[in-house]
Amino acid sequence: MEYDLQDRTAVVTGAGRGNGERIAKRLAADGARVVVNDLDRDPAVGTVEDIEADGGEATAIAADVSDTEAVDEMFETAADRFGTVDTLVNNAGVGKVQKFTEKPDDTLLDLNLDTHLKGAYHCTRAALDGMTEQGYGNVVNITSIHTKNGIGMSPQYDIGKFSLLGLTKTLALELGREGIRVNAVAPGWVDTRMTETFDDRTREQITDLNPLGRFADPEEIAHAVAFLVSPAADYINGHELRVDGGQQTIDNYKFEGDMSDKF
Ligand SMILES: NC(=O)c1ccc[n+]([C@@H]2O[C@H](COP(=O)([O-])OP(=O)(O)OC[C@H]3O[C@@H](n4cnc5c(N)ncnc54)[C@H](O)[C@@H]3O)[C@@H](O)[C@H]2O)c1
């Protein structure tokens, strides 16, 4: 299924790999001009090359979404190159965690909040003037299955994603009046770099607990984002769309995996 994104300009953060890469490619295939952001330049350039090889339009901008100046500069460059940004996918994410019982210092908490919450906050703020002026905009925040109940072993990540869901809900209320929709996509477990280091036992337990019995392909996350930013979803605002195969959560009492530093 395709959604028409002709004449649209999208920024996708963390789009050098994994979910972001597939989202960027999908939006470009649907007709959008895409700004491919990532902390790392080379993978972002790789995504752009693939999009261009398929006949799409894209440009790579390396920037850390937690750095406000770099973010403001990115949106200025994006507007100069492709015109007003009307579509923003806050996807950049990290998976570094430590159990609370191990008494972690603030480093991992700061990293998770800076990337997931503040990154999305900065990027949405930088996109706001353009979206408000044209009276139209779309923001999709990539949350996680962790926003259901938490999973009891990755507190810094869970807090980052819960707060990103909070940002989604509150901005949907305020920005809806400006013609800007703000939604979230909550992936379950997806085959990306973030999960590739899971050992066999961890993967087995996750798939055992999933009604569909498998991890998601990043393309399946991209489909959901493509729908939410398209005109087909014009009356959907403040919604978190779960793309998790029906998985409710990881059952902390059955799950024996250790998430520390693994994703
Ligand atoms: N893989 C999963 O199972 C899963 C599940 C739920 C949610 N998610 C979310 O999906 C999103 C993408 O994750 P992924 O699985 O594709 O992981 P990934 O590690 O493959 O990709 C994440 C990308 O984000 C970039 N990034 C990290 N920090 C950044 C920053 N400060 N500024 C700009 N770019 C930055 C990385 O360089 C990387 O290219 C994340 O928000 C993640 O939390 C992933």
Image: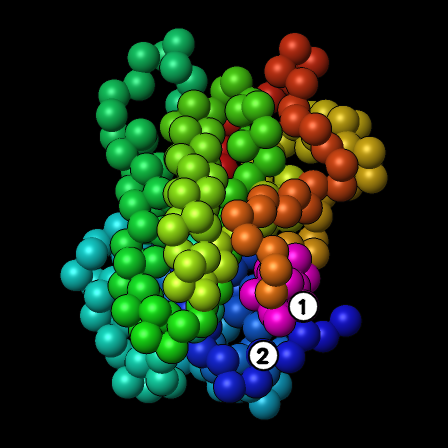
Q: Where is residue 60 in the image (x, y as percent from the top left)?
A: 38, 75
Dominant secondary structure of the magenta stretch? helix
Q: Which amino acid does label 1 sit on?
A: Ala
Residue numbers of the magenta segment: 222-233
Alpha carbon distance from label 1 to label 2: 11 Å
Circle 1 SS class: helix
Q: Does the magenta stretch include residue 231?
A: yes
Circle 2 SS class: loop
Is 127 left, or right, of 193 in this rendering?
left
Image quarter of residue 14: bottom left
User: According to the image, label 1 marks what residue?
Assistant: 232
Residue drawn at point x = 22 percent, y = 66 percent = 72
Residue drawn at point x = 39 percent, y = 9 percent = 101
Q: Residue furthest right?
A: 212
Q: Which amino acid does label 2 sit on?
A: Leu
User: According to the image, label 2 marks what residue?
Assistant: 5
Is 74 left, or right, of 175 in this rendering?
left
Can you say which quadrant of the picture contains the N terminus? Answer: bottom right
Q: Can residue 113 be seen in this view?
A: yes
Q: Residue furthest bottom?
A: 55
Q: Position of residue 96 (x, y in %)?
A: 40, 35
Q: Nearer the viewer, residue 199 or 34?
A: 34
Q: Does the magenta stretch include residue 259?
A: no
